[in-house]
Image: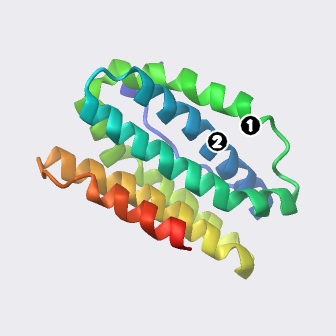
């Protein structure tokens, strides 16, 4: 079943550690996912968008790494997780550009709910990292909205996130 035929569902985690592990692993999958989309998209502007989204996943993963190690939840092989993400990219290629934007706009808000639940479980020291997760999803959603609206500067929101995340 492809993303075109199913809705993304918010996960509910029994513990903060479980949710943080899942989020960290999803970021690694995201790296493989967006790297695959960027490498195989024949349209330069779209490849650039996917590359920026890859950079967002990378800067977010890097920010989460120390905490994931400290919590003992960074145990799975990062390359295996990236390979899982790359395999998922086939579904998105089948959606086409417009379909992928619709999924980002309409279904990615589920992640805001998921991360909101994680934030409620978060020890104060980890709250800024969960905020980072929330903000990176907002960047993807806002990009999709702007792109669907035909705004020429739609990629600015991705660049703004990268500047902000690298500075924090």
Residue drawn 45% across the image and 56% down it:
137
Res 130 seen here: yes
Residue drawn 80% across the image and 34% down it:
77
The image position of residue 121, as x and y in percent, is: 70, 71
Q: In this picture, is 48 found above or below 86? A: below
Disc on the earlier residue, 1 or 2:
2
Separation (CA) of disc 1 from disc 2: 6 Å
Q: In this picture, is 62 found above or below 104? A: below
Question: Which residue position is annotated with label 2?
Answer: 28
The image position of residue 79, as x and y in percent, is: 72, 31
The image position of residue 19, as x and y in percent, is: 71, 55
**Label 2 secondary element:** helix
Question: Which residue position is annotated with label 1?
Answer: 78
Residue drawn 46% across the image and 65% down it:
135
Q: In this picture, is 58 found above or below 37? A: below
Disc 1 crowd rating (10 Å Cα; few below 14, some 14-19, many 20+) is: some
Lateral position of residue 44 relative to residue 74, left or right: left
State the residue in front, 82 or 144. Answer: 82
Residue drawn 13% across the image and 49% down it:
149
Lateral position of residue 26 relative to residue 99, left or right: right
Res 15 seen here: no
State the residue in front, 115 or 136. Answer: 136
Asked if the residue under mark 2 is in contact with the one under mark 1, i.e. CB atoms within 8 Å, the reply is: yes
Disc 2 crowd rating (10 Å Cα; few below 14, some 14-19, many 20+) is: many
The image position of residue 35, as x and y in percent, is: 50, 32
State the residue in front, 144 or 159. Answer: 159
């Amino acid at each position: 079943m492809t993303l075109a035929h199913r809705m993304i569902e918010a996960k509910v985690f029994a513990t903060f550690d479980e949710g943080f592990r899942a989020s960290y692993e999803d970021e690694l999958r995201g790296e493989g996912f967006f790297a695959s989309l960027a490498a195989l998209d024949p349209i330069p502007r779209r490849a650039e968008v996917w590359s920026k989204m890859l950079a967002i996943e990378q800067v977010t993963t890097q920010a989460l790494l120390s905490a994931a190690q400290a919590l003992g939840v960074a145990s799975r092989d990062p390359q295996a997780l990236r390979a899982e993400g790359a395999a998922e990219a086939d579904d998105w290629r089948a959606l086409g550009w417009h379909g992928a934007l619709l999924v980002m706009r309409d279904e990615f808000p589920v992640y805001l709910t998921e991360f909101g639940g994680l934030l409620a479980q978060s020890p104060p020291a980890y709250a800024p990292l969960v905020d980072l997760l929330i903000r990176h999803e907002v960047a993807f959603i806002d990009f999709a909205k702007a792109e669907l609206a035909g705004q020429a500067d739609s990629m600015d929101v991705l660049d703004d996130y990268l500047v902000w995340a690298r500075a924090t």
